[in-house]
Image (cartoon, rainbow, N blue to C red):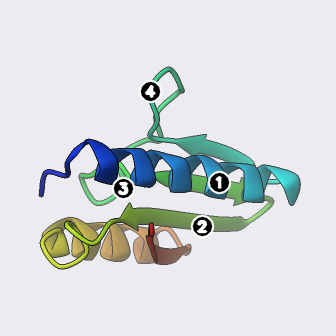
Amino acid sequence: MAKRGKIGQARHDGKVQQRLNHYKDQGFSVKADLPDRAKPRKIGGRIPDIVAKKGKQLIVEEIETASTKNSDKDQQTRLREGTKKLGGTFKIIIAK
């Protein structure tokens, strides 16, 4: 997993919080990989940034920054494949 600097981490965490709020506003049950929050369960052996559930709908998101979007391919692949096995939708979101 690639490392990001303080600014990159702040952008990442801000985008994770934004996506969490987005799904909560739409009535989803959401878990996010943020400090002081209940972490999502592993999918494909990795912990995703966002897991949103509503009824049978499952959305899994991985938030990347400029420094990690091309270097975290293994994690992205594992999450994509794990989400597919669960019948969900996987998205990569770039924090800017």
- Dot placed on the residue nearer the N-terminal end, 3 or 4: 4
Which amino acid, mark 2? Ile
Q: Is residue 27 visible?
A: no
Disc nearer the start of the sequence (2/4): 4
Q: Position of residue 16 (x, y in %)?
A: 53, 52
At horizontal 52% and vertical 27% (from top left) the residue drawn is: 38
In this view, the mark in front (3 or 2): 2
Question: First in sequence: mark 1 or mark 4?
Answer: 1
> SS for tag 3?
loop
Tell me: residue 34, above or below residue 85: above
Q: Amino acid at mark 3?
A: Ile
In the rendered structure, are the residues bearing label 1 and label 2 in contact, judged by CB atoms less than 8 Å apart? no
Horizontally, is 91 left or right of 53 in the view? left
- Alpha-carbon span between mark 3 and mark 2: 12 Å
Q: Secondary structure at mark 1?
A: helix
Query: In which quadrant of the rendered view does residue 2 lie?
Result: bottom left
Cβ atoms at labels 2 and 4 below 8 Å apart: no
Q: Which residue is disc 3 drawn over?
A: 43
Select label 3 or label 4 by which is in front.
4
Q: Residues within 10 Å of mark 3 (few under 14, many from 20)?
A: some
Which residue is tagged 1?
18
Q: Local crowd at mark 4 within 10 Å, few (<14), some, or many (≥20)?
A: few
Judge left or right: residue 53 versus residue 31.
right
Residue occupied by mark 2: 59
Which class describes the residues within 10 Å of circle 2: few (<14), some (14-19), or many (20+)?
some
* Separation of residues labelled 1 and 2 (CA atoms): 15 Å
Q: Between label 1 and label 2, give the one nearer the viewer.
A: 1
Reading the image, the residue beneath label 4 is: 35
The earlier-in-sequence mark between 1 and 2 is 1
Identify whether 50 is placed above or below 75: above
